Amino acid sequence: MAKQNFLPLYEKNWYKLNYKRVTESLLLILLLLLLCYRVISVKNYSFPWFVAFLCESWFTISWFFTLTTQWSPAVIKTYPDRLLQSVQELPAVDMFVTTADPVLEPPIITVNTVLSLLALDYPPHKLACYVSDDGCSPLTFYALQEAFKFAKFWVPFCKKYNVQVRAPLRYFSGKPEGSTDSNNTPEFKQEWLQMKDMYDNLRQKIELDEFQKSNPCHGEFDIFSNTEKTNHPTIIQVIWENKECLADGLPHLIYISREKKPKQSHHFKAGAMNVLTRVSGLMTNAPFILNVDCDMIVNNPKVVLHALCILLDSKGEKEVAFAQFPQQFYATLKDDPFGNQMAILIKYLTAGIAGLQGPFYGGTNCFHRRKVIYGLFPDSMEKGNRLSKDELEQKFGDSKEIMKTVHDALEGKTYLPNHTNISMAIDIAAQVASCGYEHGTGWGKYVGWIYGSIAEDKLLGLTIHEKGWRSELCTPSPIAFTGFAPGGGPIAMAQQKRWAIGLLEIFFSKHCPIFGTIFHKLTLRQCLAYMWIINYWGLKPLFELCYACLLSYCIITNSNFLPMDLGICISIAFFVSYKIYTISEYLSAGLSYRAWWNNQRMSRITRMNAGFCAFVCILLKLLRISDTVFDITKKDVPVRDDAEDDKDAGRFTFDESLVFLSGTTILLLQLTIMFIKLLGLQPLMPTHNGSGVGEIFCSIYLIICLWPFFRGLFEKGKYRIPFSLVSKSIILTWCFIHLCKRTMHD
């Protein structure tokens, strides 16, 4: 496949941010000084003092995770021109798109993602697009059929005029755009208007025919008769097969809805990905797999070439398991009011992780080696991974066709495009997509996407790193993919809660990163990086909520947990230094003060609500009281790229979900203790000065952070906290105050 080439296809450069290193080290020293102060202040030992010491100890550990994770950032530069000169023939790539609910994930979004993939700057006969529909929706199938008809005109238009953004939803939301030479020609303007009219017709067909196609009973939609979302047979339809292997044709397009039966575990997205892996193995068996979520559209049509620069490099071919592209968003709100655009996290933390064993698998925007998904270790790359027939059957199931494709993939054998017959493989593919095929095999255990966590992406990436593989972060210009940032309130909290639950499931399992370092080949700093993300979403919320409750306890009982003497200078120095440090991060990234503050307050809100709720869910799972549930994130179709003019777009919304209970309770608790303090209802404490200015300042700061909840007490409609939640919070607040007063009399 490759010619002899002495120039690397990509370069990885580490760089230092000395001012960040100095500041982060200073913050760590201040935290250690605070802990030392608490240890040596023997005369101040008390229950609040002890709890504060435990929380601050964990905050210190958390900061150490952050420091070591972003200590040595790295950046990748790829050379697609060198790749084209180095290879005799470009390899095939299978593209996976996953969707699960036509209501929460409108088919028009999935269609735009598929259209952007079909229009990639890559030989189309080397591409195959597989769409997994876990909702078994006839509307999704219908939308894909209509989208392919549109693609026959859209793809040539994009390539003719070198269009960069090849998702029509986004392309037509702005001004006409093409190559510089053709942008102003009458021919381009005429074709642009024609394409826009065709896309508008496509969109109207999908949206207007929604109800007609939701319950089909005739024609080619007979396959959806008598089907339910959780009870239906396997449905595989080849919408398009490029049988002639035309270089100017369109990639294969296949629709898949795996079999589902009631009371059988389907392992959520991980199960769908494993079905896609088996079905694509039978049909095209490409050595590389790209997987994207249904809302992640291609923003750089040369993305495949950039990824292959890493995966086909002489060194990367032996060491790199997957190439991960960062998740970035468009149609975003000004100043990130919901704190979910993750600009700073991508710039600093992700770059820092890239300098270690490699970035985490993000669940989307990722190119995998198929043989790594099949369980190959890096030590076996050169000598191959020959498995006996019994071993193949034990790991991959009793399908002879699957065993053959796995053997070919592990040996590096690929199908020639003119030797594939996708339509002929449908019957066999339906068998391996059945819900019972995986029983007694290694799928989900040590082959394919691993089961055991609803954060299937982090779990798979962790198991790959444990084998000794590296990964690389690819950041071409322009950025490779852009997606839809979730809205605020229930949608954002549900997504954050799911992430936190999945990460905690990993931590409390045999796949814990600590075990990966002790017993496997996960490097120490990579382990600390995994602990950072587990802590950030899953563990730290418990200590933050505990710290907030401790604050309330001290004001109610007129005690203190902050130093009353010169030791308070340590806390003040840390608070001020940390705020200056985070502000400088945002300003250096070109963001505003308001964006900084929005992310500061949302980090409190997210951890106190979604994070703590996730911890409770995991506790109930560990006690075998209930199991975790995979909540699909709702995707809203943006009307335009820029939503700044919508005054209500950045307002926080609520529903009756218990995910908002802890935040509402903490707010009511802080308001109550302020009244207790102002009215002088605290008990007299003759032995010391009682709660001081530090505790009052922290309480006020917390109320300001929870300001969207405060407004939610008085707003109307979806912007108001439901009365049922407020009632529960009032009861919990009363119980907490009552318990605090009882401790004073015991």
Image (cartoon, grey):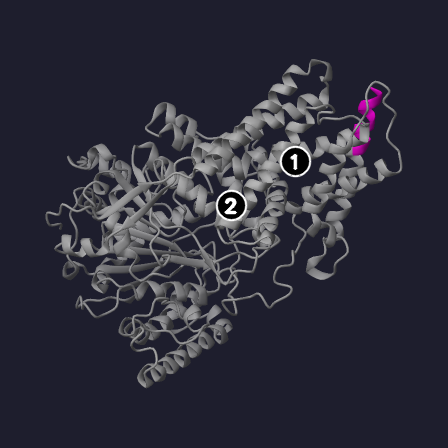
Q: Nearer the viewer, residue 674 or 653?
A: 674
Q: Quadrant of residue 377?
A: top left
Amino acid type for the residue under numbered disc 2: Glu
* Residue type, mark 1 in image: Leu
Q: Which mark is residue 545?
A: 1
Q: Is residue 450 above or below residue 481?
A: above
> Dot 2 corresponds to which residue?
585
Mark toward the start of the polypeptide (1 vs 2) = 1
Q: Quadrant of the C terminus?
A: top right
What span is in magenta?
Answer: 737-746
Element assignment for label 2: helix
Q: Which element type, helix, strand or loop, lies under badge 1?
A: helix
Of 708 and 627, nearer the camera is 708
The image quarter containing residue 440 is top left
How crowded pointer 2 is (Cα within 10 Å; few <14, some 14-19, many 20+) is rated as some
Q: Is residue 665 left or right of residue 611?
A: right
- Inspect the magenta stretch and tell me whether residue 685 lies in it: no
Q: Position of residue 267 (x, y in %)?
A: 43, 45
Residue 526 locus on image (x, y percent):
39, 33
Residue depicted at 76% across the width and 30% down the height? 553
- How many other residues sit within 10 Å of disc 1, few (<14), some (14-19) or many (≥20)? many
In this rendering, does residue 307 appear at all? Answer: yes
Q: Is residue 745 magenta?
A: yes
**Quick check: 668 above or below 162?**
above
What is the x, y in percent for residue 311?
A: 24, 46
Residue 579 to residue 296: above or below: above
